[in-house]
Amino acid sequence: MSSQQWALELWGEAEPHPLAEVADEVLARFADGAARPQEVARLAGFADALGSGEPPAALEPQLRALSHAGFLRGAMVTMAAALRRSPRPEVAVMLARELMDAIDPELGVRLLHALLAMPGEDQSRTLRDRMHSRRDPGSVQATADLLLGEHLLEHGDPGGALRHFEAVLAVDIDHHRALRGWQQATRALERRGAVPPQSGRGLTLLDGLAEIELAQAFGLRRYELGRPLGRGRHAVVYQAYDRRVGRDVALKRLLDADLRSAGPSTRVLQARFFEEARTLAHVRSPYVVALLDVQPRHRLIALELCRGGNLRLAIRRGLVGPADVPRIFHELRAALDAVHAAGAVHRDVKPANILVRTPFRGSPIALADFGLAAGPGPKSAGANAGTLRYLAPELRRGSAAATLASDRFSAAVVLLELALSPAPLPDAFDRLDDALDADQYVPDDLPQPWRSSLQALLSRDPDARVW
């Protein structure tokens, strides 16, 4: 009997498939002199387990025991023969791992490449699910990508390794081996001066695509698109996964519809959009949303993701109420102090622009949406500076400049709304009336010193607005 015949007879004839060619090479390379199942009871048990389709959790201990007993060659040939008969992805990964462990690395790489090329149209749904389940960080595809990434990194190809590590991180954001490999590959590329551009392919496709098309477009490079978080007149915000860093972010992008002309208003709009990034780049506070990335080419900024929605929703859901006034007073004060220390005026402080970090009671806030932010002075004036019900009396005339004091007034209206909840703000705040006397609406039962502080911040005199 030839060196391969016993292995071929063990499983019978095989249907052609991409793994069979590599399996035949393993048989040709290792069958000669390998222990046979009919000679070793333990190896016969391993062959039976393979034939009955036992899971990797049951096969791995048997493989380790055979290796320790000196029968690894026979075990590899048995796995190759089983693969030739039935293209089980899990068995292919087990065999590739052994080959790449200094036995025949290139043959192991070929087997993994053949595996990742599967399944073709002729393969079953079950096989596709086992190969490509994105919900399972231990899927065969993720394991194959990890092995290939580590092999390529070890053999001097950090660029190729990076692609495989990113594929793993797209499935499991906390995969320590993939994160470590990604960092090593990135550093190796940096030393060569060949860091890949941090731009997301498909960012220009944000508008007008179906959800699945958007997900595919974002998943190819840095950002993998998630659910939409909100949309304003000029920008749309999505939750996304930053595959390069390994975290969820909020992607805010200027809508294409606003950029079809190149007139002055379009240039102003785009300048205002990136003014938010310039402002946030200079602000440091745990109560201000953090800037993570700016991509002018794609009219995109990436921001820290806050999962609790905004303060308006938190009030409606009963997650915050009058009892939270002292805490949010301190957090909002710290946020505005940091903005003002950076030389900026927010100009649009309101519950919709105050995010809640988690969807739980007591969660800290984060001041956001700096699209109207500007330095104190004449350019801050105008009717577009803020939302009517939160505007200071001097801004309701439409001629005064936004100042630090007008930001404090807006913050005080937010705190007043919280103190009055679930009742709404009085109608007087929605009237275009510069005679608004807001401090009279502070509830008498609000404890001191918060009542006095809120009255001072709601004063008609800007100089009297101190925390």
Image: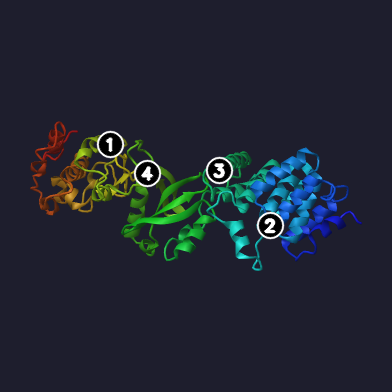
Location of residue 184 (image quadrant): top right
As measured in the structure, the alpha-carbon distance from the residue carrying label 3 to the one carrying label 4 is: 33 Å
Label 2 or label 4, whichever comes before in sequence order: 2
Location of residue 13 (image quadrant): bottom right
Label 2 or label 3, whichever comes before in sequence order: 2
| Image position, residue 382 (x, y; %) | 21, 51
- Residue kind at label 1, given as amino acid type: Glu
Residue 112 visible in the snapshot: yes
Look at mark 1 in the image and give the residue it sits on.
331
Front residue of 430 and 416 = 416
- Residue kind at label 4, given as amino acid type: Arg
| Image position, residue 21 (x, y; %) | 78, 60
Label 4 or label 1, whichever comes before in sequence order: 4
As measured in the structure, the alpha-carbon distance from the residue carrying label 4 to the one carrying label 1 is: 22 Å
Front residue of 70 and 114 = 70
**Element marked by disc 4:** helix
Label 4 neighbourhood size at 10 Å, few (<14), some (14-19), many (20+)? some
- Residue kind at label 2, given as amino acid type: Arg
- Judged by depth in the image, the label closer to the viewer, 2 or 4, is 2
Look at mark 3 in the image and give the residue it sits on.
175
Label 3 or label 1, whichever comes before in sequence order: 3
**Element marked by disc 1:** helix
Label 1 neighbourhood size at 10 Å, few (<14), some (14-19), many (20+)? many
Label 3 or label 4, whichever comes before in sequence order: 3
**Dot label at residue 146:** none
Look at mark 4 in the image and give the residue it sits on.
278
- Residue kind at label 3, given as amino acid type: His
Location of residue 334 (image quadrant): top left
**Element marked by disc 2:** loop
